């Protein structure tokens, strides 16, 4: 298996972010682009084990840090740059995804061992990365299929409390507690301004109407962070081209943790991978 870690790319605001590439065969079936969620990063917990399984199954698997997720190239496992985190917004995240897609088409050295670069691109997004995938797939037909794992159904999900946006505007910032690290992570009001400026484009319910790619929605029934109701909403909005798979008893990270020292995936995560691979294989026939 070929594994290239911590390749450097320039993303939003010309900020450097890191990217990993996995593949095990010279002619992969398709590319899988994995996008992490809120307070997530590419090296979290079980993502490496999952990447290896996709590579062994014949896929070119790419995972990366969104440029303003709070990590740095020097400290990719921590959140030392909270100012960057606070300045993040959805337009910047979409710019980062575009940077990866452009990199893919530029014949980078990491892919020199491939006899053939697969033309099909499948987007997998976890949590907020899944909600972002709804928006991105609607606007970008380079994405051939969309898979969401424990996805939010709305990108403004955290701002729905009455009066929240007004208080946010007045203070200029609100803080999200990172339960793992104990950090109070800032989000500046510019994030809402960016969201509002996009109009309907960032409203997932409306974006879903513009998706004609096949979609797989996977969600755990015991998810304490994003209720399974979000999965039902996405399925309702996306209609017949979307398949819904609920994993009984699975939590938001499908049994994973950070750090994760096991050599095999937790049971729910293995079901997640198997379900996703079955879906991707069905697209080949």
Image (cartoon, rainbow, N blue to C red):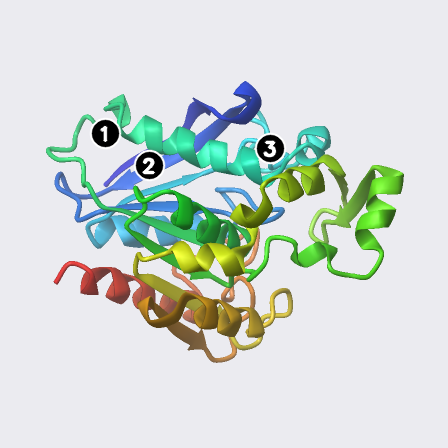
Using the rendered image of the protein, determine whether residue 118 is visible from the camera's viewpoint.
Answer: yes
What distance separates the C-alpha of mark 3 from that of mark 2? 20 Å
CB atoms of marks 1 and 2 within 8 Å:
yes
Location of the N terminus (image quadrant):
top left
Residue where numbered disc 2 is placed: 21
Count of numbered labels shown in the rendering: 3
User: Which one is earlier in the sequence, the residue at label 1 or at label 2?
Assistant: 2
Residue where numbered disc 3 is placed: 68
Image check: 142 left or right of 117?
A: right
What distance separates the C-alpha of mark 3 from that of mark 1? 26 Å
User: Which one is earlier in the sequence, the residue at label 3 or at label 2?
Assistant: 2
Give me the residue at 76% from left, 50% from top.
177
Image check: 72 left or right of 59?
A: right
User: Which one is earlier in the sequence, the residue at label 3 or at label 1?
Assistant: 3
Instruction: Choose between 35 and 158: the one closer to the eye.
Output: 158
Give coordinates of residue 245: x percent, y percent.
40, 74
Residue where numbered disc 1 is placed: 111
Give me the residue at 55% from left, 22% from top.
15
Instruction: Choose between 205 and 284: the one closer to the eye.
Output: 205
What label does residue 159 carry, if any?
none
CB atoms of marks 3 and 2 within 8 Å:
no
What distance separates the C-alpha of mark 1 from that of mark 2? 8 Å
Label 2: how many Cα within 10 Å (few below 14, some 14–19, many 20+): many
Residue 110 lies in quadrant: top left
Give coordinates of residue 119: x percent, y percent.
19, 41
């Amino acid at each position: 298996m070929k594994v290239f870690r911590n390749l450097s790319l320039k993303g939003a605001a010309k900020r450097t972010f890191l990217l990993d590439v996995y593949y095990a065969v010279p002619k992969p079936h398709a590319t899988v682009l994995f996008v992490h969620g809120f307070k997530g990063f590419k090296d979290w917990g079980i993502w490496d084990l999952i990447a290896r399984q996709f590579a062994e199954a014949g896929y070119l698997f790419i995972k990366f840090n969104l440029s303003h997720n709070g990590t740095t190239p020097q400290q990719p496992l921590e959140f030392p740059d909270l100012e960057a985190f606070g300045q993040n917004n959805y337009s910047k995240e979409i710019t980062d995804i575009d940077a990866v897609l452009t990199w893919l088409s530029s014949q980078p050295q990491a892919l020199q061992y491939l006899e053939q670069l697969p033309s099909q691109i499948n987007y997998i997004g976890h949590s907020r990365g899944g909600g972002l995938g709804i928006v991105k797939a609607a606007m970008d037909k380079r994405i051939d299929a969309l898979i969401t794992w424990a996805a939010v159904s709305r990108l403004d999900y955290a701002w729905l409390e009455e009066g929240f946006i007004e208080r946010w505007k007045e203070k200029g910032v609100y803080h999200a507690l990172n339960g793992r690290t104990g950090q109070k992570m800032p989000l500046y009001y510019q994030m809402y301004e960016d969201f509002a400026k996009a109009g309907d484009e960032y409203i997932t319910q409306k974006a879903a109407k513009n998706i004609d790619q096949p979609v797989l929605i996977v969600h755990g029934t015991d998810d304490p962070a994003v209720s399974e109701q979000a999965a039902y909403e996405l399925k309702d909005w996306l209609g017949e081209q979307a398949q819904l798979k609920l994993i009984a008893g699975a939590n938001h990270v499908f049994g994973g943790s950070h750090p994760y020292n096991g050599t095999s995936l937790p049971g729910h995560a293995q079901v997640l991978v198997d379900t996703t691979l079955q879906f991707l294989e069905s697209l080949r026939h």
